[in-house]
Image (cartoon, rainbow, N blue to C red):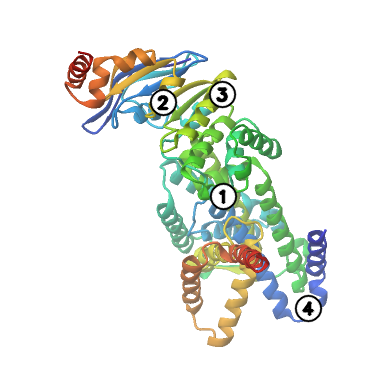
Amino acid sequence: MLRAAVTGAVMAAALAAPFLIASDFWLGFLITVLLFAYMGMAWNVLGGYAGQFSFGHAVFFGAGAYTSSILHVTFGLNPWIGLAFAALAGGGVGALIGFLSFRFGLRGSYFALITLAFAEVFRILANWVEFTGGGVGLYIPLKVHPANLQFGTKAGYYYVALALTLASLAIAAWLERSRFGAWLKAIRENEDAARALGIDAFVCKLKAIMLSGAMTGVGGAFYAQYYLYIDPGIAFGPAVSVEILLVPIIGGLGTALGPLLGSAVLQGAGELARRVMGDVPGLNLVFYGLLLVVMVRFLPDGLIGLAARLRTLRRRAKVLADA
Amino acid sequence: MLEAIRITKRFGGLVAVAEASLHVPEGRIVALIGPNGAGKTTLFATIAGFLAPDTGEVRFLGENVTSLAPEAICRRGLVRTFQIAQPFGGLSVRENIAIGAHARIADRRQALALAEQVAAELAMTVLLDQTAAALTVAGRKRLELARALATRPKLLLLDEVMAGLNPSEVDDIVAVVRRVRDRGVTVLLIEHVMQAVMSLAEHVYVLNQGRMIAEGPPLHVARLPQVVEAYLGHGAAVRLGAQAVEIAT
């Protein structure tokens, strides 16, 4: 009852936000929070649920961003349809990386390294070949119309980002209630035991990386439409990879609401750091690195885990007080 | 039901299992015993698809399943437990057992219901909401058994599910294994706890240094000189025999 009321209130506030927030800056901030919550959830499918840590999710982000942009700029394809192709591209790259790494049994840090390497290879390729615009990047021509996935105000982008986030929450809820989600958790916890109980770990991990890649690809395509510009460094650079993986790590790995919480905290802290220290290039990466170390060392369960721990402590304190 | 035919498994220069054969008829409880390092767990891993044998063949329900993947063998109805319990530590006991149930059941709610039912059969109902990592050794062993049972197997391979348990816990598991068999599940078990082997098994295989050295009904096998020597050292059977004669006279 309370839960339904809270959910309803949050939904109403989320829908009304563009009317309540006059500042373009803060609406832009919310769009970034939602976009990274969405991509954090995409990462969470593979990293949080299936336990396969990727350090190179930019490879899916970039594949999606470049696919929709090139199809739009070069072939005049509508960007809304481009989103579907971005999903295909992200899923396809996921299938390639997943097949190569899982077939040969790469786990843990070896898998993380191979994803990092793939993102770097794609970054160099995007710099080198012609149809990506090379190092100059790709400009998406300004044709403001909702049919072109371009909006005159930030409100339009906000609703698209909100829809993506809600879709990712629905996927998380499905993982929590389905056999596939249970299988991914089993693989994360103990792959040998999972296989002994009839779980085809290879196929499950492959499906997880394809789903995660497809979702992240759509995020990349949205990003390109929002900023109307991408280059190899933005699309395939390590900054995006780190930002995506920090979101669920801060919020709570393998939880449905963790990425949303994590994204809000990460973007808030990032904004605060920018205000305090100014916009020094590369400083954000230092900040992310520090945050990652602190989280992994002190809060491996993320903020959701911290909340659960506090609840247990309070219950224990209450029991002690009653006794 | 299960037939392992002249299985050989080498690790580098070490021959862990050498031309070992065994046969498990349907509806029986068969035990595989032998001293530490005899190759029992290796033979189990080979049967369940975790290791590919160098030579030899595993047949299950008339089908050659040699070097099929473990998940494929599980889906055919042959499930193993692990000697060192391998719980899904971060998940609750309920979720752990449900993952076993999902081998046959796609629906989450039905799987969770079956998990509760299996937990009740194993007297684990109070533990359902605990995280598996918080279980005691006895609890983990029981969870191994519960997860395997939830897959609804035809043949259950139990690798030392009674090691480290106290005598009353052993009695509990013995009763469970017997109930499982009475419901039509065939059982092959590795066990060091002789109390359990003697009361459960109808047929015993003895493995020593990778070779099958004896088989037969438990009481018969326990008296064979080569079995006594495998456990107590060369010449032990003769010494023990002489002592018995001395005491008698």
**Host chain of mark 3:** B
In the rendered image of this protein, does residue B223 appear above or below residue A148?
above
Distance, label 1 to label 4, CA atoms, is 44 Å
Q: Inspect the image, locate mark 3, and give the three-letter code of the amino acid beneath it.
A: Val
- Looking at the image, do the residues carrying marks 1 and 4 touch, with CB atoms under 8 Å apart? no
Label 2: how many Cα within 10 Å (few below 14, some 14–19, many 20+): few
Label 3: how many Cα within 10 Å (few below 14, some 14–19, many 20+): some
At x 60% / y 44%, what residue is drawn?
B127
Q: Inspect the image, locate mark 4, and give the three-letter code of the amino acid beneath it.
A: Ile
Assign a secondary structure to mark 1.
Answer: loop
Q: Inspect the image, locate mark 1, and give the three-letter code of the amino acid beneath it.
A: Thr
Distance, label 4 to label 2, CA atoms, is 75 Å
Distance, label 4 to label 3, CA atoms, is 65 Å
In the rendered image of this protein, does residue A110 appear above or below residue A228?
above
Q: In the image, is A30 to the left or to the right of A44?
A: right
**Host chain of mark 4:** A
* Residue corresponding to mark 4: A21
* Residue corresponding to mark 1: B131
- Looking at the image, do the residues carrying marks 3 and 1 touch, with CB atoms under 8 Å apart? no
- Residue lying at the far front of the rendered structure: B249
